[in-house]
Image (cartoon, rainbow, N blue to C red):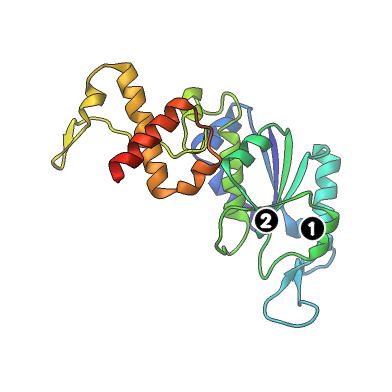
Amino acid sequence: MKFDVVTIFPRMVAAGLAEGVVSRGIARGLIDVAVHDLRDHTADRHRTVDDVPYGGGPGMVMKPEPLARAVEEIRARRGQPDAVVVLTPQGRPFKQSEAVRMSGLSHIVLLCGRYEGIDERVRELVATDELSIGDYVLSGGELPALVVIDAISRLVPGVVGDEQSVEQDSFSDGVLDHPHYTRPAEFGGVKVPDVLLSGHHAEVRRWRRKTALARTLERRPDLLDEATLDDEDRELLKEIREKKE
């Protein structure tokens, strides 16, 4: 899996790649991430990447030429990307299903905006996708780029040591994760549920699934509309709803 990140703050992105799962994936040669300084693709001595907006208004707008040049150079040096993504609040919501889809690609370019936004012609002429990591505004696209890389990289075989852990993550089948416990068996007067200490694997599995469904129903009921549910799940949800009533 190959990523290219275009930003005016390359050290900010590099710092986020230096630790954790993604860092290990890079060290193992499973992920290839190149970070590009947008200012290296400017044409003036001031290395200008922004200008005032046509029509007036506050703030500055990122110019189209440096971003287009950066993508052209990535194509020449790193190959044709499968996707060129602008990270913006106007983009399609980045969900686990989107991470799964994109994990099937081999080369993704991520363009990090700043200021008031990016010239619309970048979206029309350069980008293939627009993604948003949430309904809020950040100072730039660097943190979203790191989020996208992390979420996709976890799905690359070998990046996470325990692949079963990835399969059981929240949202993997459309519902939230079940509660987790470890030693000690009692902390702050709260005990670990007896079923987890019972050694009955079938009962443990059922408890975990039921609590995952209950948590989803309580906190994110909207997810259940598109979740992958079987007959047992529907029966468990019926029990949960009847108990609430």
Under tag 1, what secondary structure? Answer: helix
Residue at the far left: name it: 189
Under tag 2, what secondary structure? Answer: strand
**Whether residue 46 can be seen here:** yes
**What is the spatial separation of the Cα atoms under label 1 and label 2, in whole angstroms?**
11 Å
Q: Residue 178, how many percent across, how many down?
A: 37, 35
| Residue corresponding to mark 1 | 123
**For residue 47, which quarter of the picture?**
bottom right
Say few, some or many: other residues with alpha carbon within 10 Å of mark 2 (under 14 / 14 to 19 / 20 or more): some
| Residue corresponding to mark 2 | 91
Q: Residue 79, how many percent across, how many down?
A: 82, 37
Residue type indicated by callout 1: Arg
Residue found at x 31% / y 23%: 204
Above or below, comparing residue 60 to residue 142 in the picture: below
Image-based side of 73 in relation to 117, left or right = right
**Whether residue 11 can be seen here:** no
* Residue 77: numbered disc: none
Residue type indicated by callout 2: Gly
Residue found at x 22% / y 31%: 193
Above or below, comparing residue 154 to residue 68 in the picture: above
Above or below, comparing residue 137 to residue 218 in the picture: below
Q: Residue 68, how many percent across, how many down?
A: 83, 55
Q: Are marks 1 and 2 in contact (CB under 8 Å)?
A: no
In the rendered image, the quadrant that contains the N terminus is top right
Residue found at x 70% / y 66%: 117
